[in-house]
Image (cartoon, rainbow, N blue to C red):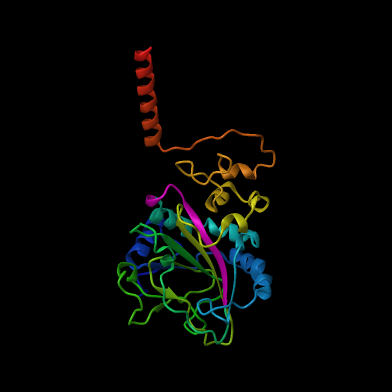
């Protein structure tokens, strides 16, 4: 009998979301079609070959990483909007922000001999944020088979409900899954990259989503400037930050950043974007002014 956090590609969005919230993570076996996986692998292969090994203790000196994946792979663009990842991300994070956003894209190759990472919670990067709920959902896509021997991601089930735990005293669960599968885990769930005891490197691709008002880990506007982002779909461009949030947050010359993606952008005036409550309050205030002025006249 499979573990309760393992589901197949026929799972509903609601059941997948519930599984993530219950255990802190979920594994969707064979979430990608074989053609999608082959296209993704082929588009990223040369970038893995060209990537340098990481520096520092956390990223791993025997691990290759590279970002800005959406500019390197058309299939990755589609993957970013995949229903198995984006649906639960919106369901889990959407109630705490107007729009969720892409936190980062990161391709990872763990080489033989690589040590395991220190266990950690990804959303600890925002320890100063005054928010007690979930801030992030990660989608780890397996480009190769993930095994206990080759460095499968390790996850500690239930630790999203144990904020007092820093370093678990139990072994993590290895996210063992075939290539093309997906491991979703909350930013509050303790996890790490496993050690690679095999003779072959292990490749994975992380798509991470977070609350729209947080500073994302990967700077989206430098990673995907207008000349690149205008080739994305409107939904993807919005997800990486080419949008305006209420009240007039993230504007350029008082306009939505998405207008920078227009090739024939005309001169435009400042234009506000307010919440319904703010609009009603300002309208009420203006009516009071008009009433007062008419009496004074």
In percent of width and height, residue 63 lies at 57, 79
* Relative image position of residue 203 (x, y in whole percent): 57, 75
Residue 7 seen in render: no
Q: Position of residue 6 (x, y in %)?
A: 40, 70
Question: Residue 104 lies in magenta, yes or no?
Answer: yes
Reply yes or no: does residue 167 show up in magenta.
Answer: no
User: On the image, which quarter does residue 136 sit in?
Assistant: bottom left
| Quadrant of the rendering where the N terminus is positioned | bottom left
Quarter assignment of residue 199: bottom right
What residue sits 54% from the left and 44% below the top? 251
Q: In the image, what residue occupies the spot 41% across and 33% down?
A: 279
User: Which quadrant holds the C terminus?
Assistant: top left
In the depicted structure, whether residue 214 falls above or below residue 200? above
Q: Residue at x 42, y 65 (%)?
A: 123
Q: Which residues are magenta?
A: 95-109
Query: Residue placed farthest to the front in the image?
Result: 296
Q: Main secondary structure of the magenta part?
A: strand
Q: Measured from the top left, where is residue 243 in percent x and y?
A: 53, 46
- Relative to 114, is 42 above or below? above
Residues 110 and 19: in front is 110
- Comparing 188 with 293, the one in front is 293
Res 38 visible: yes
Left/right of residue 278 with respect to residue 70 in the rendered view: left
Query: Horizontal placement of 290 versus 43: left or right?
Result: left
* The residue positioned farthest toward the top in the image shown: 297
Task: Give the vertical position of 236 relative to 28 (above or below).
Answer: above
The answer to which image quadrant residue 51 occupies is bottom right
Who is closer to the viewer here, 295 or 125?
Answer: 295
Q: How many numbered dots are placed on residues in this image?
A: 0
């Amino acid at each position: 009998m499979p573990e309760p956090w393992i589901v197949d590609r026929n799972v509903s969005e609601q059941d997948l979301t519930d599984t993530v919230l219950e255990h802190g993570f979920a594994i969707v076996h064979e979430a990608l079609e074989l053609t999608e996986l082959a296209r993704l692998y082929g588009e990223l292969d040369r970038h893995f070959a060209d990537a340098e090994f990481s520096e520092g203790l956390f990223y791993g000196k025997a691990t290759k990483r590279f970002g800005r994946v959406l500019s390197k792979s058309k299939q990755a663009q589609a993957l970013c909007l995949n229903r198995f990842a984006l649906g639960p991300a919106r369901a889990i994070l959407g109630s705490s922000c107007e729009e969720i956003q892409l936190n980062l894209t990161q391709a990872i190759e763990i080489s033989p001999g690589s040590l395991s990472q220190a266990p950690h919670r990804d959303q600890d990067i925002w320890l100063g944020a005054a928010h007690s709920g979930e801030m992030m959902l990660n989608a780890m896509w397996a480009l190769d088979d993930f095994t206990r021997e080759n460095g499968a991601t390790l996850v500690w089930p239930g630790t999203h409900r144990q904020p007092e735990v820093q370093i678990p005293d139990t072994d993590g669960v290895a996210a063992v899954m075939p290539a093309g599968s997906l491991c979703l885990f909350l930013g509050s769930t303790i996890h790490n990259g496993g050690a690679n005891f095999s003779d072959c490197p292990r490749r994975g691709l992380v798509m991470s989503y977070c609350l729209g008002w947080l500073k994302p880990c990967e700077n989206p506007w430098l990673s995907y400037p207008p000349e690149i982002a205008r080739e994305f779909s409107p939904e993807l461009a919005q997800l990486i930050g080419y949008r305006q949030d209420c009240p007039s947050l993230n504007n350029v010359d008082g306009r939505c950043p998405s207008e920078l993606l227009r090739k024939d952008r005309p001169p435009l005036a400042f234009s506000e974007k307010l919440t319904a409550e703010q609009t009603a309050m300002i309208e009420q205030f203006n009516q009071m002014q008009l009433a007062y002025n008419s009496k004074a006249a």
